[in-house]
Image: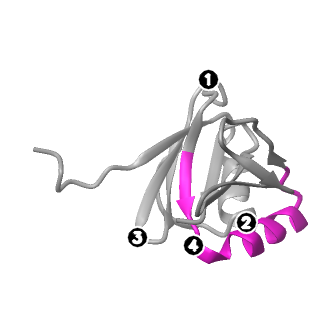
Amino acid sequence: MLANKDAIATIAVKDLEVAGKFYEGTLGMKKVDQGSDEGVSFQSGNSTFFVYRSQFAGTNQATALTIKVGNDLENIVQSLKSKGVKFEHYDMPGMTRNGDIHGEGNMKAAWFKDPDGNILALVSG
């Protein structure tokens, strides 16, 4: 029924202006739709995600958005660090960490938070 339908990640934020500066300015996402005063859509590759105003922003303690970056992971991490993004470090079974990048086998990942504390991930595969 839904297998051929597009899914859109949704991320709750407190302040759309601050979130817009982060997602568009810091991360380089393209704003594709300012649907209302309460939300905005951004494009990442062939996907879109929706950022909306909510009093519950930042309460999710799990990854809210994952971005596949392929072999560019290390360069993107360094670029974001130069823009002030701070990366999270997690102790997970089977994973090793080299600087800000976690790895298990061929999979590498790095996690960081948006201004509201939503957890975002960059993955190599």
Is label 4 in contact with label 3 (beta carbons under 8 Å)? no
x and y, in percent, of residue 35 in the image = 43, 51
x and y, in percent, of residue 6 in the image = 27, 55
Q: Compare marks 1 and 2 and give the one earlier in the sequence.
A: 2
Cα–Cα gap, marks 1 and 2: 23 Å
Q: What secondary structure is marked by label 2?
A: helix
Q: Residues within 10 Å of mark 4 (few under 14, many from 20)?
A: few
Q: Tell me the residue that label 1 is attached to.
A: 55
x and y, in percent, of residue 60 in the image = 60, 27
Q: Compare marks 1 and 3 and give the one earlier in the sequence.
A: 3
Cα–Cα gap, marks 1 and 3: 29 Å
x and y, in percent, of residue 23 in the image = 66, 58
Question: What amino acid does circle 3 point to?
Answer: Asn
- Does the segment drawn in magenta span residue 4? no
Question: What amino acid does circle 1 point to?
Answer: Gln
Q: Tell me the residue that label 3 is attached to.
A: 46
Given residues 104 and 99, the one toward you in this image is 104
Residue bounds of the magenta highlight: 65-86
Q: Is residue 34 above or below residue 72?
A: above
In the image, taking residue 8 as reference, residue 123 lies left or right, namely: right
